[in-house]
Image: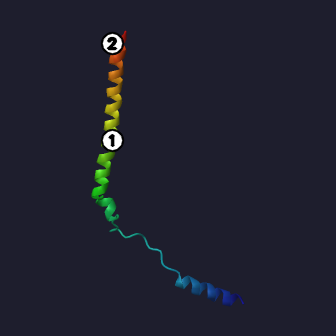
Amino acid sequence: MSSSINSNHQAHEDTAPLITDEDDTFLPPRKVVHPGESDKWLRIFYLSLLWVFILLVAGLLIWGWQRVKGEA
């Protein structure tokens, strides 16, 4: 009985896929190397929104300080 288990176990080991190291010439996906044009424009859009918000807050603060100075 044990010999049939051993032969069955050996047969399973022979059909198991071989694990190899990754190829040295592995390249990352194209999207990582060359980001799409839409990603570039999306980044520009978000940065412009951020700057508009910063300028709006700064403008409102300056306008508010000038109004407070005028009333005093």
Give me the C-alpha separation between circle 1 and circle 2.
Answer: 32 Å
Crowding at mark 1 (Cα within 10 Å: few <14, some 14-19, many 20+):
few
- Tell whether 24 sits left or right of 5: left
Q: Residue furthest right?
A: 1
Q: Amino acid at mark 2?
A: Gly
- 8 vs 43, nearest the viewer: 43
User: SS class of the residue under badge 1?
Assistant: helix
Q: Residue furthest front?
A: 71
Q: Is residue 7 above or below residue 53?
A: below
* Residue at position x 31%, y 32% in the image: 55
Q: Quadrant of the C terminus?
A: top left
Residue 57 at x, y percent in the picture: 36, 30
**Residue behind mark 2:** 70
Task: Select label 1 or label 2 by which is in front.
Answer: 2
* Residue at position x 67%, y 87% in the image: 5
User: SS class of the residue under badge 2?
Assistant: helix
**Residue behind mark 1:** 49
Q: Is residue 42 above or below residue 70?
A: below
Residue 10 at x, y percent in the picture: 59, 85
Residue 53 at x, y percent in the picture: 35, 36
Crowding at mark 2 (Cα within 10 Å: few <14, some 14-19, many 20+):
few
Instruction: Give the total of numbered labels.
Output: 2
